[in-house]
Amino acid sequence: MPLGLLSLVIQVVAAVHLLRTRGDMRWLFLIILVPGIGALIYSFVEVLPSLGQNPAARKALIEYFQNYVDRTFPANSP
């Protein structure tokens, strides 16, 4: 049951993103007709590349990964 709910949430988020960005409506058919996987394919093909074009999103991603690396691999102190 939780996996089905997660799939539904991912589908709704992908569909809302598609409608807000006024993307190609053929994606909506994929999102609806192929539950879960269709939304993930949409995310990888449409959403992730657009994050690199948005300066605010790019800055947030860089800061996130810098903080992650700093937490994961702390500098050796003498």
Image (cartoon, grey):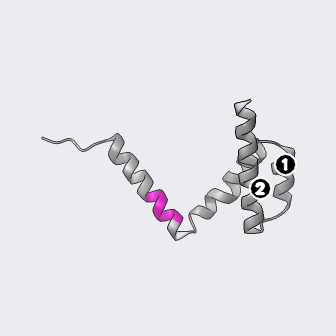
**Magenta region:** 57-62
Q: Position of residue 27 (x, y in %)?
A: 81, 56
Left or right: residue 73 compared with residue 43:
left
Q: Residue at x 68, y 53 (%)?
A: 43
Q: Position of residue 15 (x, y in %)?
A: 77, 56
Residue where numbered disc 2 is placed: 15
Residue type indicated by callout 2: Ala
Please tell me which of labels 1 and 2 falls first in the chain. Answer: 2
Q: Is residue 61 magenta?
A: yes
Q: Quadrant of residue 14?
A: bottom right
Left or right: residue 7 compared with residue 30:
left
Q: Main secondary structure of the magenta part?
A: helix
Residue where numbered disc 1 is placed: 32
Left or right: residue 68 compared with residue 23:
left
Q: Nearer the viewer, residue 13 or 51?
A: 13
Q: Residue at x 71, y 46 (%)?
A: 10
Q: Residue furthest left?
A: 78
Q: Is residue 23 above or below residue 71?
A: below
Q: Is residue 73 magenta?
A: no
**Whole-Å distance between the Cαs marked 1 and 2?**
8 Å
